[in-house]
Image (cartoon, grey):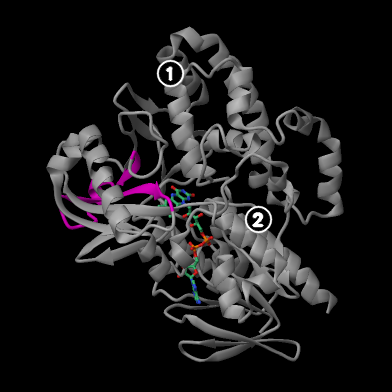
């Protein structure tokens, strides 16, 4: 076997697909009985819920996911959303449209004293985000790139110039430059958005990452009919169609080094591979490789960065399909009263399945709601945060509270147990302000022929980033295998 991939999250799926397409023999192993990891759909008590991630960019026909599936005659059943999400706070409500002009004008109307500066800010944000997203829309431009892509970068280097001004600066300092610190409603929206994307607040977020994240509503953002697990399963099908094998319910228990490769002992057997792709957090990767973190500078550095991040506390509900915002799948971004950071249940991201998906039988829908929680979190803190989530959710969306028939919870321990993320760290490395964010602009190799993929590695969080990072990593490792 050329490549063994451990973990069928979107990072592992992206790596396995590309490595197989490049002619490698590939085996992909997953502990759970279904792929997707933090972005999967699971079944409990006769109902289907989204495990964590619920709102995805890059789902348009020309986006990475549909293009990858189309190569195998597959297509994800996607419905692009408009409005993309509903914002509910004690001060205001807003439907976030998928049209950029309408979006900017909605903010100008909500913040009339700042309308002119809001338009100026979003004009510049659009220009910069366009440059950043071009890298996602055409991943050949990401490292490692070939001579043709290098020439294209040189040819368009002037486009990168305006970005230089904001490298190493926070989004907050950019908003200051546009005189927008007083635009409290916009600030509160951007704070929540930064928290769920780049995992930190406006004042701490590295501007370029945050500017790209602000573009989420306009980048083929939608709902996968049946849940994100449908996309994960279609991706696993594509991996098989590309010639790889996919082994579900087959946890990799141990990895040992052998002559010219590695031996993997899995729940169901054993396999030898020349190269390893680990869709794991640094600590889990070190454990599997049997090396102390302190013996590997790359893993240790990443582990330290991961620990500056957060976990997630979750509420999952079955609700009656009556009186809710819309029969379509929808997302409600809720901020509680008071001047709190958008974490610990003061901010809740709530997603409802579509009425006609019948996720819990006819007439019922399911809800997944999440909030960021500081780690380590003991049982008492988790219970307190979940209680606050209920309060935030039920005050802002009382229709949902009235329609609820059943609730289930999850905590960082649940993520640690089910998707093997030590201590329950999710969402990758926070993009806090600093030039160190640009230190690794390409695939992450932690030992010879051992690569790390997923939201901890290049280029970062979200299923789109994890899958594209996996794909680019496969390109690097196959070059290495060819040389050998
Ligand atoms: C609550 C929450 C909400 C989010 N919301 C969004 C969102 O709306 N949109 C978005 O794009 N992103 C969102 N994200 C982030 C997104 O889910 C992640 O960035 C992405 O799914 C991470 O993928 P990954 O491949 O890095 O890892 P994971 O999804 O963690 O996948 C790792 C896989 O490896 C498997 N595994 C672990 N150990 C082993 C082993 N020893 N052997 C075999 N298999 C193993 C696990 O079971 C798992 O399937 C959210 C995350 C959370 C937690």
Rendered residue at 67%/38% (across/down): 132
The local secondary structure at tag 1 comes to helix
Q: Which residue is mark 1?
A: 106
The disc, 2 or 1, on the residue closer to the chain's N-terminal end is: 1
Magenta range is 346-374
The local secondary structure at tag 2 comes to loop
The residue closer to the viewer here, 161 or 381, is 381
Q: Is residue 454 magenta?
A: no
For residue 14, side relative to residue 82 (left or right):
right
Q: Is residue 206 visible?
A: yes
For residue 94, side relative to residue 383 (left or right):
right
Rendered residue at 48%/35% (across/down): 217
Position of residue 40 measured from the top left corner of the image (x, y, whole percent): 40, 61
Rendered residue at 31%/55% (across/down): 382
Position of residue 66 measured from the top left corner of the image (x, y, whole percent): 53, 52
- The nearer-to-camera label among 2 and 1 is 2
Image height check: is 321 above or below 399? below
Q: Is residue 360 magenta?
A: yes
Image height check: is 409 above or below 102? below
Q: Which residue is mark 2?
A: 458
Position of residue 411 measured from the top left corner of the image (x, y, whole percent): 34, 59
Dot 1 surroundings within 10 Å: few (below 14), some, or many (20 or more)?
A: some
Q: Is residue 70 visible?
A: no
Q: CA distance from mark 2 to mark 1?
A: 34 Å
Image height check: is 178 above or below 265? above
Position of residue 432 measured from the top left corner of the image (x, y, whole percent): 60, 42
């Amino acid at each position: 076997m050329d490549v063994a991939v451990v973990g069928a999250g979107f990072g592992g799926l992206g790596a396995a697909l590309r490595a197989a397409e490049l002619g490698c023999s590939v085996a992909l192993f997953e502990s759970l009985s279904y792929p997707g990891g933090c972005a999967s759909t699971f079944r409990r008590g006769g109902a289907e819920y989204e495990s964590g991630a619920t709102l995805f960019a890059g789902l348009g026909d020309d986006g990475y996911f549909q293009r990858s599936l189309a190569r195998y005659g597959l297509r994800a059943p996607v419905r692009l959303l408009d409005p993309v999400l509903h914002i509910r706070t004690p001060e205001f409500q807003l439907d976030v449209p998928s049209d950029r002009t309408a979006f900017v004008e909605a903010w100008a109307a909500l913040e009339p004293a700042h309308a002119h500066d809001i338009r100026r800010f979003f004009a510049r944000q659009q220009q910069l985000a366009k440059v950043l997203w071009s890298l996602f829309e055409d991943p050949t431009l990401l490292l490692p790139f070939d001579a043709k892509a290098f020439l294209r970068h040189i040819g368009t280097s002037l486009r990168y110039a305006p970005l230089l001004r904001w490298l190493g600066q926070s989004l907050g300092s950019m908003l200051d430059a546009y005189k927008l610190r007083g635009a409290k409603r916009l600030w509160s929206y951007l704070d929540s958005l930064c928290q769920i994307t780049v995992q930190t607040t406006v004042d701490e977020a590295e501007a370029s990452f945050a500017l790209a994240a602000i573009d989420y509503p306009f980048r083929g953002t939608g709902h996968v009919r049946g849940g994100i697990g449908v996309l994960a399963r279609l991706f696993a099908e594509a991996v098989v169609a590309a010639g790889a094998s996919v082994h579900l319910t087959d946890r990799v228990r141990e990895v040992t080094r052998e002559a010219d490769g590695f031996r993997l002992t899995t729940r169901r057997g054993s396999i030898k591979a020349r190269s390893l792709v680990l869709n794991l957090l640094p600590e889990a990767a070190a454990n599997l490789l049997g090396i102390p973190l302190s013996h590997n500078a790359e893993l240790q550095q990443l582990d330290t960065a991961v620990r500056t991040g957060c976990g997630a506390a979750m509420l999952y509900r079955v609700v009656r399909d009556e009186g809710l915002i819309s029969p379509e799948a929808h997302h409600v971004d809720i901020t509680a009263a008071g001047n709190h950071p958008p974490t610990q249940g003061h901010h809740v991201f709530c997603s409802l399945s579509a009425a006609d998906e019948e996720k819990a039988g006819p007439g019922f829908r399911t809800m997944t709601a999440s909030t960021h929680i500081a780690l380590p979190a003991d049982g008492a803190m988790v219970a307190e945060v979940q209680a606050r989530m209920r309060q935030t959710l039920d005050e802002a969306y009382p229709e949902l509270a009235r329609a609820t028939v059943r609730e289930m919870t999850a905590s960082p321990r649940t993520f640690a147990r089910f998707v093997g993320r030590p201590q329950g760290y999710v969402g990758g490395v926070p993009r806090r302000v600093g030039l160190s964010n640009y230190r690794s602009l390409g695939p992450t190799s932690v030992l010879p022929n051992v690569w790390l993929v997923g939201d901890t590695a290049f280029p970062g969080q979200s299923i789109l980033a994890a899958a594209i990072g996996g794909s680019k990593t496969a390109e690097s490792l196959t070059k290495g295998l060819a040389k050998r």
